[in-house]
Image (spheres, rainbow, N blue to C red):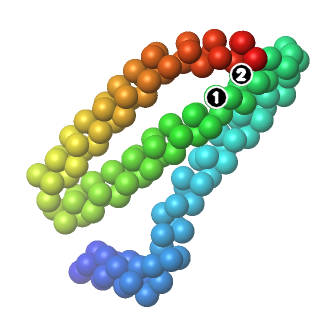
Amino acid sequence: MQSSDNRHSRLQSFLDNPARSMWRLALPIIAGMGIQTLYTIVDMIFIGKLGGDSIAAVAFNMPIFFLVMGLSFGLGSGVTASIARFIGADDKANADNAAEHSVAMALVISAVLTTGGLLFGPQLLIMMGSQ
């Protein structure tokens, strides 16, 4: 009986203040990306000892890296919430379906990004080298 009351109270808290609930869902993603930013800053400190070209290469790739991180964190958080909701509702078929589709989406995204990197990465390096 308490678990259904707990579910009701969570739903009610979301309905009462959806903006606060969305922030509670977004905070882990924000924290993860903040840690990645700190990681990049530390990388810049160490790479800075190698010279300006090395820093330029890392700075050029940072937005692309954050795009991939955002896609990964967003997909992972959304899928986790979806699967948890289905499991909580004792709906194993839809939970399995959500898990299968998330793996398929991850494979498609990784294939597109890998292909794009292999096709356009060398061209971008040549363009950067000619400037």
Dot 2: within a 10 Å radius of its alpha carbon, few (fewer than 14), some, or many (20 or more) residues? few
* Residue ID at (27%, 62%): 85
Q: Secondary structure at mark 2?
A: helix
Quarter of image, res 23: bottom right
Report the amino acid beneath label 1: Asn
Mark 2 and mark 1 residues within 8 Å of each other at the beta carbon: yes
**SS at mark 1?**
helix
Q: Which residue is mark 2?
A: 57
From the top left corner, tell me how far across and down residue 69 is, in percent: 53, 40
The picture quadrant where one finds residue 37 is top right
Quadrant in which the C terminus appears: top right
Q: Is residue 81 above or below residue 69?
A: below
Name which residue type carries label 2: Ala
Q: Does 24 appear above or below 104?
A: below
Using the rendered image of the protein, determine whether residue 9 is visible from the camera's viewpoint: no
Q: What percent of the width, then of the height, locates residue 92?
A: 14, 53
Residues 99 and 109: in front is 109
Residue 12 % position (x, y)? 37, 85
Residue found at the far left of this picture: 93
- Relative to 121, say whether 68 is above or below: below
Marker disc for residue 61: 1
Quarter of the figure that contains the N terminus: bottom left
Residue 2 in the image: state x and y as whole percent.
29, 79
Who is closer to the viewer here, 89 or 114?
114
104 displayed left or right of 90: right
Q: Is residue 3 visible?
A: yes
- Seen in the image, is 50 located left or right of residue 116? right
> Residue at coordinates 28% horizontally, 42% vertically from top-left?
102
